[in-house]
């Protein structure tokens, strides 16, 4: 199928990038055999997960140019669907995950329609508001465990429920999603919707003059982003085996996702990955170091926010933007 | 049945009546120009036709269909293309890719869109700039790319918004020649709003003149150039009487 | 009776909300930027009142000018240190930038003062109540409401009646035209931030008299401010006032309603949800708010 061919076709990237990517993939595949400790493994899993989130966010936030700060609600939808279905009715992961994605898609179309009447700041604030509303609702809804959250029953090692005792399995699981996401995004940016979205970002009026229904395109991109993120959420449920509104639907989660994509370079394939590669280890190592120094609490976010402000002021196109600038491509 | 018919179009912006009761029609295959002094309401009229604004009164009828109040993407889809006075050029898409976006209206895959886009760029003699980013191109070429992009949606009526603004005399001549070719070889009806007389007068078969939101004259360019009301609108009372 | 009581409380809080939102709407009106860090300015105003009153042993009300000064300083520093650069960039950058500022200030507070809740316990107003007819009102809240009203009026007077204020409004209405008339727009920007910061700083000082002081309090009031500004109309001062009162009433009456209707679905835990919903509904159905797009 043409789409599949397109997904694997990286020929329009410079050779250097393709080589680096290839080496990186080899590294990722071999990683568990390189003798890292469990903390390092956990960091890598987190990195792959957040790359997934970032790439998803990128469809609407990067290529679409609509910065949205409400992704956490979809993480929650994905995670809770899997968790609730498993706890209550013993539903296997491979049934509950697609269901979670469908719910995420449905919900995103539902609120996307009114949301995309807004632009810019208003839109961003509205996305925050919707995420907070959903978080509030979940915190008070007994069916999903309210504030206490849900603890998933332990099933040992099971492919049906996607639970494992050995982290290595989880690693390859998330790696599969990660690679899938890369190929999908590679297809996406060359697809009709991808081009239309990029035109909308540059000049929405011009896009409309070319027959593009801007609002509908944005909603579609938003829905795709939500699906990505919901898949990541479903992973969190079976990995952590415990979820609550605070951990999966937190506003800070939405911020981190958007931040990673923007730091690395929104609107590029590699950007979210680069951003995650920097921020996830930073967050984890800083977090564990700070854990031992209670009096320095807050320092981690002070650093992130300083990074955010710096990037916003001097290179809004992120690290990848800096790379491109070096190459002489202007924005 | 006229190709494009505007009937009693009125648009007011909370007190300022930008267009009042404007009526005219365009036949298929014509080249029609719209002129008038600053603030005459040309841009408003243009935007009411393409759908950027919704008229407060009157109708716009295209090929027998009432398209009054239709949104821009809807009018584009039935064959009304438009160019922009200012091209927002950001470094993210090459000239070819800009035109491809237009081509995507009638194509579903990248290869088809690229082929069609390349054809149009070749037609306009712009093959060499295909892989350059718009920001790297001079204004005149940018505008030509904008024209190519509009052509990619296979319009039957092309509305040109101040297509010559910012161009020097040589570039303006080139643009006029290009427009004539497009009209002749592609059979597209052209409707231009313009300030630059060197563009409008040589190629229009008919010219419509607006002033203060009202249509004050209509006819072939030679007649319009000597019409007292038109001269008065542009140059003021003194000059008109002086004739 | 309980309802009427809540209603009055709502109006009192409303004056304060109006003052809090005033700064946000001024900044937006003059330069089209949404200050995500607005709540954090408020929070820092609160901490200022707390620390100054404790260390100097004075009544918190006396600290109000200091709160205002701190707020103004924050505004000016934010403008010259960050916002000025953000203006050159795309909207995305502006959003991100003030967002970063929000996080920065919030976690700076966490870092400096920890996450513990603090409360001002000494002051002429604290703990006293006022009885007006059948209503028992918290003295603190009444005075704060009145002072908010005074502050709001002062700022409005400055904006509508002084030359500087006129220059500010001119810049808000049409930036280019204002610069042609010789108004230095850079200075106007900084002034807007200074005024915005000062007003919300004072609001913080007032709020500190009866509300918990902790680093995260900014988020709560930030959303209230956004909802208020959205409802009133971004950039409208009159709107900020009216909407502030409406939101104040909504916020206090809503939980009571649930109690009266004997449902637990409508309850205090959804107080903020209602505010978010208001924002959302206003933006979707009437983006310009009540008095939007005017000054």
Image (cartoon, rainbow, N blue to C red):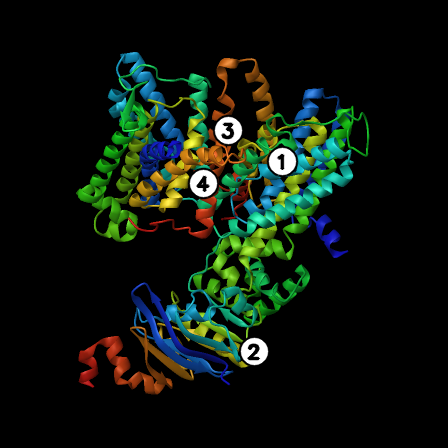
Q: Position of residue C113 (x, y in %)?
A: 42, 17
Q: Which residue is mark 4?
A: C95
Q: Disc number at residue A304?
A: 3
Instruction: Give the quadrant of the N terminus of chain C.
Output: top left
Q: Residue at x 36, y 41 (%)?
A: C246
Cα–Cα gap, marks 4 and 3: 15 Å
Q: Are marks 4 and 3 on the same chain?
A: no
| Structural crowding at the residue carrying mark 4, measured as other residues with C-alpha within 10 Å and reported as few (<14), some (14–19) or many (≥20) | many
Q: Disc number at residue A67?
A: none
Q: Are marks 4 and 2 on the same chain?
A: no
Cα–Cα gap, marks 2 and 1: 54 Å
Q: Which residue is mark 2?
A: B186
Mark 3 or mark 1: name the one nearer the start of the chain. 1
| Circle nearer the viewer, 1 or 4 | 1
Q: Position of residue B147 (x, y in %)?
A: 50, 68
Q: Disc number at residue A76?
A: 1
Check whether the beta carbons of the residues at disc 3 and disc 1 lie within 8 A of each other: no
């Amino acid at each position: 199928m043409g789409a599949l061919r397109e997904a694997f076709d990286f020929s329009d990237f410079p050779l250097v990038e393709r080589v680096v990517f290839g080496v990186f993939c080899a590294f990722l595949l071999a990683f568990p055999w390189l003798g890292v400790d469990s903390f390092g493994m956990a960091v890598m899993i987190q990195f792959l997960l957040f790359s997934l989130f970032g790439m998803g966010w990128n469809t609407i936030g990067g290529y679409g140019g609509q910065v949205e700060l409400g992704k956490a609600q979809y993480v929650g939808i994905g995670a809770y669907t899997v968790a609730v279905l498993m706890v209550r009715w013993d539903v296997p992961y491979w049934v509950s995950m697609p269901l979670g994605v469908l719910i995420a898609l449905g919900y995103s179309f539902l609120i996307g329609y009114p949301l995309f009447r807004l632009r810019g700041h208003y839109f961003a604030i509205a996305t925050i508001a919707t995420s907070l509303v959903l978080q509030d609702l979940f915190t008070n809804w007994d069916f999903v465990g309210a504030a206490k959250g849900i603890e998933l029953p332990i099933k040992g090692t099971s492919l049906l429920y996607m639970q494992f005792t050995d982290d290595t399995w989880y690693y390859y699981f998330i790696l599969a999603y990660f690679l899938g996401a890369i190929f999908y995004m590679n297809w996406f940016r060359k697809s009709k919707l991808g081009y239309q979205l990029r035109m909308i970002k540059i000049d929405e009026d011009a896009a409309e003059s070319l027959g593009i229904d801007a609002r509908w395109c944005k909603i579609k991109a938003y829905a795709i982003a939500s699906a990505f993120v919901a898949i990541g959420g479903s992973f969190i449920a079976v990995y952590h085996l415990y979820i609550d509104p605070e951990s999966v639907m937190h506003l800070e989660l939405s911020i981190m996702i958007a931040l990673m994509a923007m730091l690395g370079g929104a609107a590029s394939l590699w950007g979210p990955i680069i951003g995650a590669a920097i921020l996830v280890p930073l967050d984890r190592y800083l977090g564990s170091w700070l854990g031992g120094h209670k009096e320095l609490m807050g320092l981690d976010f002070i650093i992130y926010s300083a990074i955010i402000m710096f990037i916003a002021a001097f290179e809004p196109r992120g690290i990848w933007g800096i790379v491109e600038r070096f190459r002489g491509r202007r924005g | 049945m006229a190709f494009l018919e505007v009937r009693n179009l009125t648009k007011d912006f909370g007190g300022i009546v930008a267009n009042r009761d404007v009526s005219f029609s365009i036949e298929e295959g014509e080249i029609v120009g719209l002129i008038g002094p600053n603030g005459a309401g040309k841009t408003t009229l243009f935007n009411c036709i393409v759908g950027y604004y919704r008229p407060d009164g009157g109708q716009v009828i295209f090929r027998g269909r009432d398209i009054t109040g239709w949104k821009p993407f809807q009018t584009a889809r039935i064959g009304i293309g438009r160019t922009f006075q200012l091209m927002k050029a950001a470094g993210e898409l090459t000239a070819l890719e800009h035109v491809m976006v237009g081509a995507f209206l009638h194509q579903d895959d990248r290869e088809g869109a690229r082929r069609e886009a390349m054809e149009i760029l070749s037609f306009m003699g712009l093959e060499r700039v295909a892989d350059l980013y718009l920001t790297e191109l001079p204004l005149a070429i940018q505008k030509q790319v904008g024209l190519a992009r509009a052509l990619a949606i296979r319009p039957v009526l092309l509305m040109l918004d101040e297509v010559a603004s910012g161009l020097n005399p040589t570039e303006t001549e080139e643009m006029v020649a290009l427009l004539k070719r497009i009209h002749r070889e592609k059979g597209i009806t052209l409707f231009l709003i313009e300030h630059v007389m060197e563009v409008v007068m040589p190629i229009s078969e008919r010219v419509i003149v607006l002033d203060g939101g009202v249509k004050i004259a209509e006819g072939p360019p030679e007649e319009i150039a000597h019409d007292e009301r038109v001269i008065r609108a542009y140059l003021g009372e003194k000059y008109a009487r002086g004739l | 009776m309980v309802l009427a009581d809540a209603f009055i409380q709502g109006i009192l809080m409303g004056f304060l909300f109006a003052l809090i939102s005033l700064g946000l709407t001024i900044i937006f009106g003059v330069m089209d930027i949404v200050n995500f860090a607005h709540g954090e300015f408020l929070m820092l105003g609160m901490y200022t009142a707390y620390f100054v009153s404790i260390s100097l042993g004075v009544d918190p009300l006396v600290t109000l000018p200091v709160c205002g000064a701190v707020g103004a300083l924050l505004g000016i520093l934010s403008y010259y240190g960050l916002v000025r650069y953000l203006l050159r960039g795309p909207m995305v950058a502006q959003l991100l930038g003030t967002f970063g500022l929000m996080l920065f200030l919030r976690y700076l507070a966490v870092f400096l003062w920890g996450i513990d809740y603090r409360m001002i316990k000494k002051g002429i107003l604290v703990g006293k109540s006022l009885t007006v007819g059948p209503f028992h009102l918290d003295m603190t809240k009444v005075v704060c409401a009145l002072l908010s009203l005074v502050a709001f009026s002062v700022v409005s007077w400055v904006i509508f009646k002084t030359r500087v204020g006129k220059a500010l409004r001119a810049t808000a209405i049409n930036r280019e035209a204002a610069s042609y008339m010789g108004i230095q727009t850079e200075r106007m920007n900084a002034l807007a931030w200074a005024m915005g910061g000062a007003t919300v700083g004072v609001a913080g000082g007032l709020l500190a008299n009866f509300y918990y002081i902790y680093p995260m309090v900014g988020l709560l009031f930030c959303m209230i401010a956004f909802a208020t500004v959205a409802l009133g109309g971004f950039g409208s001062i009159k709107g900020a006032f009216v909407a502030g009162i409406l939101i104040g009433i909504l916020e206090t009456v809503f939980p009571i309603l649930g109690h009266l209707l004997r449902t637990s679905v409508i309850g205090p835990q959804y107080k903020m949800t209602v505010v978010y919903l208001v924002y959302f509904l206003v933006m979707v159905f009437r983006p310009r708010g009540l008095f939007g797009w005017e000054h």
